[in-house]
Amino acid sequence: MALRLERDATGIEIRLDGRRVARYVAHPETEAFESPRPYVYPLRTRGGVELAGFRPADHTWHHGLSLAIAEAGPANLWGGRSFDRDAHAYLDRGDNGRMTTTSLDVDGASGRIHSSLDWTDASGDLLATEERTLTASEAGEGWLLDWRSVVSAARPLTLGSPATNGRTGAGYGGVFLRLAPAFLGARADAEEGRETPADDLLGVRARRLAVTAPDRTATVALGVPAPAPWFVRSLEYPGFGPAPFFDAETRLAAGESVEFAVRLVAVDGVPSATQLAAVLG
């Protein structure tokens, strides 16, 4: 099998044909202000094109591909400042929490990484627990990464975004990919087989969204089980992801769970809508 997983002290290397295409960092060393959490970086196509950005100067709390939520009860699990409804501004409230890996298992034969995590607030109090599974697999000339997280509230917990807190359009949160600098000004397609400037798709509801670099060297697409709103940026900075809290909060009772499921496909060049549909559904 061309795909291999290699574990070390801080994470797992994902290799295809001997070349590193991704690294899952289970034990990050990022700053508290960035809401430390596990992430995937680097993230590359099979041909070696870099797809992800990490700690860019404009948003140092953007960490490749990660699960990040701006409003998690009393905690900011996205990173950076928090949006304050009364001030209608981003403020440093000292509320940055973290997601900490408590166990990690790797099954190289299936390409599967499983981990358990604790979500804690700035004081270290437990908000939720998470069971996370990442599965890497080949897909023709490209490759796939399936992300599934089941988050169980340890106490009543409301999940939301700056948009649900009063900042229109800022509905980010969930599994989010900060794209590499080469994707600035990218175009995107949301199921229709028709590319458009990526920013035009902010808030669109779709099962999948594909973003192509302006130089046409690579495409990265994300798919979800059911139509969902999307948060997309390509001009201010490049990044996108399904946005389950784009316009509504999710309220969990203690012991209640919510699932995040996303499939990523990384491809050199520009696949057709038919090719993407075959792997993303």
Image (spheres, grey):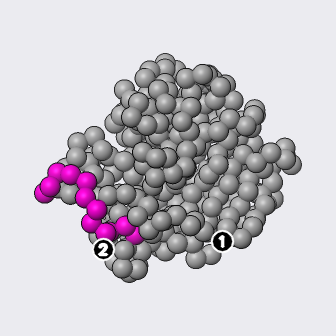
- Mark 1 residue element: strand
Instruction: Give the image location of residue 11, x and y in percent.
Output: 68, 64
Instruction: Give the image location of residue 207, x and y in percent.
Output: 47, 37
Q: Is residue 102 above or below residue 144?
A: below
Q: Is residue 167 above or below residue 49?
A: below
In the displayed structure image, the side of residue 258 where residue 85 appears, left or right: left
Tell me the chief SS of the magenta region. loop
Query: What's under tag 1, amino acid-wise?
Result: Leu
Q: Which residue is mark 1?
A: 104
Compare residues 139 and 166 and report the one nearer the observer. Answer: 166
In the picture, residue 38 is in which quadrant? Answer: bottom right
Residue extent of the magenta highlight: 86-97
Q: Is residue 75 magenta?
A: no
Instruction: Find residue 213 and name its label.
Output: none
In the picture, residue 158 is in which quadrant? Answer: bottom left
Return the disc, 1 or 2, that comes first in the chain's sequence.
Answer: 1
In the displayed structure image, the side of residue 24 where residue 56 appears, left or right: left
Seen at 76% across and 48% down, the residue is: 20
Q: Nearer the viewer, mark 1 or mark 2?
A: 1
- The answer to whether marks 1 and 2 mark residues whose Cβ atoms lie closer than 8 Å is no
- Density class for disc 2 (Cα within 10 Å; few <14, some 14-19, many ≥20) is some
Instruction: Give the image location of residue 198, x and y in percent.
Output: 43, 28
In the picture, residue 79 is in which quadrant? Answer: bottom left
Q: Is residue 94 magenta?
A: yes
- Mark 2 residue element: loop
